[in-house]
Every structure is written in structure tokens, then in C-alpha cells.
Amino acid sequence: MTNPNNATISLMHRVRFVDGHGLTIPTFRLLKDDGQLYAGASAPDIGKEQALAMYHSMVATRLLDERMLAAQRQGRISFYLQSLGEEAQAVASAAALAPQDMIMAQYREQGALLHRGFTLEQFMNQLFSNERDLGKGRQMPVHYGSRELNVMTISSPLATQIPQATGFAYGQRLAGEEAVTLCYFGEGAASEGDFHAGVNMAAVLKTPVIFFCRNNGYAISTPASEQFVGDGIASRAVGYGIRTLRVDGADALAVYEATLQARQLMLKEPQPVLIEAMSYRLGAHSSSDDPSGYRSKAEEERWRKRDPIGRYRRWLQHQGWLSEDEDRRQQDALRRHILEAMKQAEQVPKPPLDSLIEDVYAEPPAHLQRQLKQLKASANKRGGAQ
């Protein structure tokens, strides 16, 4: 029996409230911390080449993060944001997509871009806001984007990408494309109104969008326990009538399989899916944050033992696909490549000031031209670039 609002109605004759924990959502996991599969678990259909490519992207992300946080501390860039402890979820989910699928990221998905083919040189050009930056130096660091790789440019305001992803996926559906959209966000962003509007709209319009929530326990300094009382973010998707899955975000194989199956489901029947990846942010929220003010070192150490890269590395070694010597050589080569790319990007000139008023109007209006002239005069007085 249904009512006019499409809600299923079952009858009862005594008052019985359903509380916020009336639904128990399990966590999908394949790998144990020692890199072995759980009893009864099966590894996804992934070959050696793909598996090693995922590992390379995860390691490259961590080494890039280490180098660039140090660069920020040295005053060489203004800001940085690491994905320490969350590399598996970004890389493995992106690896399960096809090149034509759109990615809309929040700001901790360096690994997804790396795996898509965003080069270390392109990362550095954006971080240093030089004239080779695809965004022409108009964004603060870590706001990447690539039209060529189908990665929408990141914006700072939380959750704006969620309704945008719904709209873009709706366009994919109308065009009959064999493609989906994957939208990343954190559990803190799920407290924004855009989350509820975007997810509900996707449910109603049946758009092929994967809402990928990184639940890392903290919205900057606010723990999840102070953000909401319900069972995480996955339970909210059920409330909106869409399929959902909770996955261990530190298990690269589980994240890959979850995303792959979500994509296959959408290609058969367009509909949204929400994946909640349970993880932990091992580093600070950003280079402007000090986590010692809101969590303990003991807590961090407990999660460090569940490091996603170490777990996945052990699985690769069990397969005979990676040796310690090979791993060490590759990491040394990556460190050299990252350092060289940084040094080169540092020497590239900044974009010309004229580019500030390009790309919006066919002919920049008079007030922008007037402001640009004033800016040039001010820069000239200070010996700045033109």
C-alpha cells in the first residue's frame, strides 16, 4: 500500500517508534591488516598491471604530499592539504572508472588525478600558480582541474560539487552516454544543505552519479560524534531512497570493487549510489591546522597501524607482484622526479596580469579594464610583474 507521496505504508495498531539506529549498515572489507584476504572474501578481477599502477599512484600521492607540505613550511607555496591515510579511497575509486567518466572532487583527491594521468609537472604548476597552470594562477593551491582528464576544477566552498554532479550526471543520462559521474566529499560537507538537495534530486531524477563520502572522522576539528547522531552518512542515502554501501576506506581492493560494481549497476539502470568510505585523516586538515588541539597522539597511532598503503603493499607482495628492492627503487625515483618538477615549476614566470580579466567576457567591460589599469600602476610602483 502506498500514499500519494510514494511512501510505502504498512499498518500497525500500537505505537512503536523507529529510532535513529533502526538500520544497521555493515562495512564491506576484503583485506586484513596483514594483507591477506578474509575467509570467504574474493579479490576483485584485477590484473598485475592495474594493481601495480594503483600502488604507484598511492605512493606517489604520499610522497608528493610530504614534499609539498615541507615546501609550504619553507614559504615556497602558500598552502597545502595532504591526503595522508586516505590515499586508497581516492586512487582505488578512480581506478574503477572509465576515462569518459566525470570526476568532481573536494580537495583531498590528489590520488584520483594522479591515477587519471595528471602529471607531477601539472601539479607543481598549479601549486606555484605559474603561467603553465591550467587555471592561470587564479586558484589557491590544491584546487586542481583538467578538461582533458574529465576532472572538474575544485572549488573551496564545501559541497557545491554535489548538486553540480547530479546535474552533470543528468546530462549524461539525457545524452545517452555510457558514462557516470563520481562526486567526492567529506562527512562534514554532508552537513551542508547542498548535500541534501543534490542527493534528493539525484534520487528523483535517477541520475548515474556515485556520491563518494570520505568519512575520516573529523570536519577540520569537529569529530563526527559532534556532527551527527545517526549511523554515519550511508543511512541518509537510504532515507532518500537510493542504494548505498559502506566500505573500509583503507582497503584499496574493497574500494575498487565497490566503485566498479556501482558503475556497472548505473550503466544497466541509471540511478544514484552513495558509497561511504570509512577512514581516518592521519595528518592535519591542512597546512593551517594543528590536530594536537583536538585529538591525541595515541588515537593517531592506533590508526597509523592500519595504514592503507602498507596493507595494500603486503597484498601485492603475497601475490609475488612487488619486491622490497623494487619498491625502494621506485620510491627513490619518484622522490627525485617530484623534487625536479618542483624546482622547475618554481622558475616558471607567473601569468601576465592581463590574463586576470580574460575568459569571462568576449570583450572585457570598461570597469574591468579600468581596474586592470589601476592594478598595473600599483604593481609598477612596487616593482611587481606586469
Image (cartoon, rainbow, N blue to C red):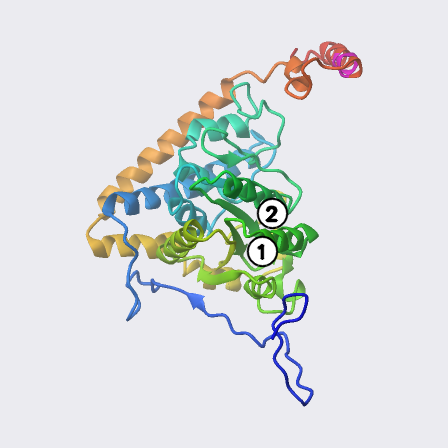
Residue at horizontal 34%, vertical 45%?
54
Callout 2: SS: helix
In percent of width and height, residue 277 lies at: 48, 58
Label placed on residue 203: 1
Closer to the chain start, of discs 1 and 2, is 2
Q: Is residue 286 visible?
A: no
Q: Nearer the viewer, mark 1 or mark 2?
A: 1
- Taking the image as shown, residue 321 lies to the left or right of residue 80, namely left
- For the residue pair 159 and 87, the one nearer the viewer reads as 159
Q: Residue at x 62, y 61 (%)?
A: 223
Q: Residue furthest left?
A: 320
Q: Residues within 10 Å of mark 2 (few under 14, many from 20)?
A: many
Q: Tag 1, which secondary structure?
A: helix
- In the image, the segment drawn in magenta is 368-372
Question: Magenta stretch mostly in which secondary structure?
Answer: helix
Residue 209, image x, y percentages: 51, 49
Q: Nearer the viewer, residue 347 or 276?
A: 276
Q: Amino acid at mark 2?
A: Ile
Quadrant (top left, top right, bottom left, bottom right) of the N terminus: bottom right
| Image coordinates for residue 365, horizontal then vertical, percent | 76, 15
Query: Could you tell whether 322 is left or right of 172 in the image?
Result: left
**Foreground: 94 or 102?**
102
Q: Amino acid at mark 1?
A: Ala
Vertical relation: 148 (above or below) 108? above
- Quarter of the image where one finds residue 29: bottom left
| Residue that label 2 marks | 162
Task: Give the residue drawn at x 31%, y 42%.
Answer: 53
